[in-house]
Each structure stands twice: as C-alpha cells, then as structure tokens.
Image (cartoon, helix red, strand yellow):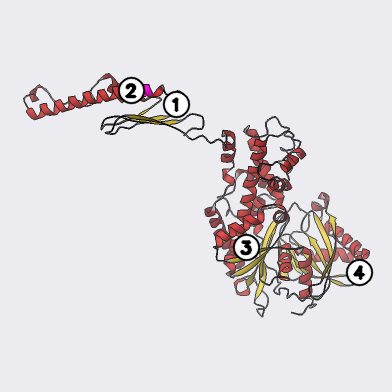
Amino acid sequence: MGQTASTTAVCSRIQSSAGACGDNNHGNNSPVAANRMQGYPLFKSNTSNNNNSNPHKMSLELKIASLEEELISKNRELAALRESISQKPGFAKLEGDVCIRSTRKQSAAVLVQSYEPLTVNSRRRKIEDYCRDLVINNDHISRMEQRLRESIEKGLDKKTHDMASVKCFPTYVRELPSGHECGKFLALDLGGTNFRVVLIEIGENEKFEMDNEVYAISQDLMNGSGDDLFDHIASCLANFAKARKIDKEVLPLGFTFSFPCKQKGLAVGELISWTKGFSCKGVEGEDVVTLLKNAINKRGDIHVDVAAILNDTTGCLMSCAWKNHNCRIGLIIGTGTNACYLEDLEKVGLWDGDINNPKHVIVNTEWGAFGDHGELDFIVTKWDHRVDEGSINPGKQIFEKMISGMYMGEVVRQVLVDLVDEDLIFAKQPLENLRTRGRFYTKYVSEIESDQVGDYTQCREALKDLGMTNVTDEDCSALRHVCECVSRRAGFMVSAGITALLKKMDYKDVVVAIDGSVFRFHPHFENIMRSRIRQLMGTEYKFDLMLSTDGSGRGAALVAAVLMGECAI
C-alpha cells in the first residue's frame, strides 16, 4: 500500500459465477483484455468443414461460441462498472491494482481506502526506517549471548586462550569481603580522563570514612610517554599524602587500573593494550605496578606498599560484596565497559596458583574486545564501522564501541549526519558542530531521554549547545528516537552479556554490582537491563542489580585489607 493518498483497493461483486482481475493502470490495454473487449475469440476451434457432420463436435462449437458471447458481455459489464466506480469520490487519484470479484449474489461495489496514519508522517516513517538497523530483537540478543559464552570458554581454556577475543584473566583475588574489615588504606584509581587518590578508614560495625581528591590527566599526558604519566600520578599521590600528613606512614595501597591487563600475581599486571583514548608509549607489555613503584621511588618523599592491582570491575564487585554476600558479578558501563565474575578454579585453565580453599577466583573477562573476531558482524552497522575507523584503535574493542559512554554519542552523531544529508532533519540549521567528530556528547543522550514524552526542554538545551535554535518539535522528537535506538541497543547488549555470565555461573540468586556513568545517569538504562535480563533468564530466576558506591576506591581498599590480613575472615 502506498503512503500518499492514494493507493486504494476496489472490490466489485457482479451477478455472475465468473470473475476477472485487472490492473487500473493498464487493465484494458493488455492484449488479453483487448481481445476480450473487441470480441475476438479466446477459444479457437480446430474444427473444419469435414467435421460439420459430427453432431458431438458441432455441440462443442456451439457451447464455445456461447461462452465467448457471454464472456464478451461480462467484459463489457466490467468495463462499465470500472467507469462507474472511477467517478466515485476518492477514486480519481487511484494508483495500483484494482481487483473485481464476482459472486452469484447481486452486484455490489465496495470502495476500501488504505489506512493513512495521522500520528506518523512520511518523513518520520523514513527516519524510523533509516534507524531500523539499530533495533535488535530477542533473536539477536540470544545469538549474541551464546557467542559470548563460547568466547568466554575459549578465553578460560589455556589451549584456545590466545585465539579468544574475550581473554578472561584470573585476577588472583579469591577472597571476598566478610563485612568485618578494618584499618586505614590508600586507593589509587586510574581509568579515564581523571584519576583519584583515596584515603579510606574502615572500622567496626560497617564504619566507613573516605577522603579523596580528583586529578586531571591532560591530552598530552594521555598520548605522551609512560614515564611522564606515572611521574604525574606519583606527584599527585605525594601531594595528597602530605596534605593529610600521612606521608610518613607506610599504608597498603590498592591500585585500580582500568585497562586490559594480564595479571601474573596479586601485584603484577602487564598492560595488554591502551583503551579509552590513551596511547602512552612504553607501557604496553610492561608491568604497570613496577612503573608506578619506580615513579614513587624516584621521588623519595612518600612510602607506599602497593598490595594489589585490580581493575574497576573487581573493585566494583568487592565494594558491593562487602554489603551483600550474594554479589558475584561486577560490571562497569561508563567511559568503557568490562565485567568480572566469580569462577570455579577447576574451570580456569590459566590458573597457575594453588587449589586450596577458597576454590574460586574472580575472573576479569575484558569483554570490551568481544566482536574483534567478527562475532558481532551480524548487528554491526555502517555507523559503528565509521566510529571504529575514526578511533585510535580501529578493529579493537568492538563491543565497547557499540555500548559505552565514550562512543555512544558519536554513534548518534553519525546517524544524525546521514539524516541531515537525506534532508530528513534539521533543515536550515547550522550544522558545523554536528558535523564535528566527537561533538555530540553522550551526556546529551541521557539529557534528551530525561524529558517527559512530548516535552523537549533538555533536548533544546542540548541542541542550543550545538548552535541550533528554534528547532521544531518534529525534529526534537526524531532526535529522541535516534537516541533511544542507540541507548536501547546498548542496554540490550549489556543484558546479553550479563545473561551469559549468569548462565555460565549457574547460581540461583546473584547480585550484579554495577557502576559507570551510563548506568548512573541514563534515565532508563537500569529498567532496560532489568526487563531484558528477566526475559532472557525467565521470570523464576532471581537476580538483582546493585549500584556500586565507589567501587574503584572502596573496592581497591577492601582488596588491600583482605590481602594484608587486616580483617577477621
């Protein structure tokens, strides 16, 4: 059915047992129809004068002639009926096929006009069609979840580990908090464009005091040398300790290092590759704990015992496990994404430690690299390819680039630029900022979707920041639709990942610790995850999502507490 006014189906009933179907555009111009209308025989007789004496043959000829005359009569009747119907209101602009059916009852003509929605115009429909590749269904999610589980199995197996996209490194953290930890600890949190130094004091009865300071990392440091980066971190750490008069104490420190890292011990971790916009030279393949210690020792003005290195997912898990002992999964969905979970030692092929109790270890999946071997090609769009091509690590961290905060806004921007080029949105608006890579921030997505439906206050504020004013409601609504497509896809993909871990662990009651700016600030992300995981796992499966309060700080300190024997476990 067409969109413009106009495609109509017409059914006519005539008093006959015969029927015909024609095309409104060329029905009477077809050769068969022309023959019918001009009275040419449709059934040619093969009889000759020699057969005239055959009564049976003559009877057949008479029947054929009678049928031809009746058919010609019906054709004339149909032509007259078409002419009559064409004069009806609403039929003048008819396009497409006309079907006229006959019955043995009296003739009747019925005009059925196609449905034309009043709430969705043709431009909006084109926009929704254009975004269709961003919409994934349960079949896609199930397929993705199965592939992720297969990738996790490959990562855990020593024989296939090197070929796996999801590496699944054991963290060497085997003990979860008991809730009775106590002591004073430092935590260093490096995982993005800022880093924190944290002083934590844990006392009895869940007493918890925290003091922290945030320090910026400039673009030059992010892309400079490794020595410069760690010298900057050591300098900030020394300033923090001196300001709080703890520079003379030797405190255990938990180092949260939120980049793909291969751990070879509790305080030994080699950087596999930089992510999140970092590209410091001389760090990949090196033990980052050693680099930090060297930078601290060069100063000579502070004394720190680096007890453990962990990533933010492990810290997130430890922080929530301190309060809820059912916590078995840690998830970060912020600037980047990653997850960890508690695995049985016998299933960790890379394990090279003892097999005494406890017989489990936290596994760092590094699932941001899922898709690097083509596992997600069936849902990757042209916009994802563009985002990947414009990144500093093309072909890597595909899963992360489809869902995390560092890239979500850029995916939206790529879609909007195409819609602009198709003249479907933002007509006569200044587009310089929109056409600038990285200029559509992920925070806009959260703000735009925070508006009530039909209200575009925050949407217009975001567009104003892009230099656009007096944007129509229609364009604001279309922009929200694009944001929803991208953010919901991200929510569904994260849900598939959590489902894969839940099925892998086979626990019946699991709490998932979650942190990160996307989960914290997107208004619907938590609800998307809850409903989708419930669908994938079944309504009888019990799970919960728990927002981690400062996992990278408190969690790092708790790891140090457990390892330094400062708790009663």
Q: Which of the two marks, 3 or 4, is nearer to us in this view?
A: 4
* Amino acid type for the residue under numbered disc 4: Ile
Is residue 142 one of those drawn in magenta? Answer: no
* Amino acid type for the residue under numbered disc 3: Asp
Q: Residue 94: which disc? A: 1
Q: Is residue 423 above or below residue 186?
A: above
Q: Residue 162: which disc? A: 3
Q: Which of the two marks, 3 or 1, is nearer to us in this view?
A: 1
The Cα–Cα distance between marks 1 and 4, rounded to whole angstroms, is: 85 Å
Q: Residue 79: which disc? A: 2
Residue at the left extreme of this rendering: 53
The Cα–Cα distance between marks 1 and 2, rounded to whole angstroms, is: 16 Å
Residue located at (60% from left, 72% from top): 347
Residue located at (58% from left, 60% from top): 534
* Amino acid type for the residue under numbered disc 1: Leu
Q: Work out whether mark 2 precedes mark 3 in sequence or the reverse, and give the earlier one.
A: 2
For label 4, the SS is: loop
Residue located at (57% from left, 43% from top): 132
Q: Which portion, as a residue range, is magenta?
A: 79-84
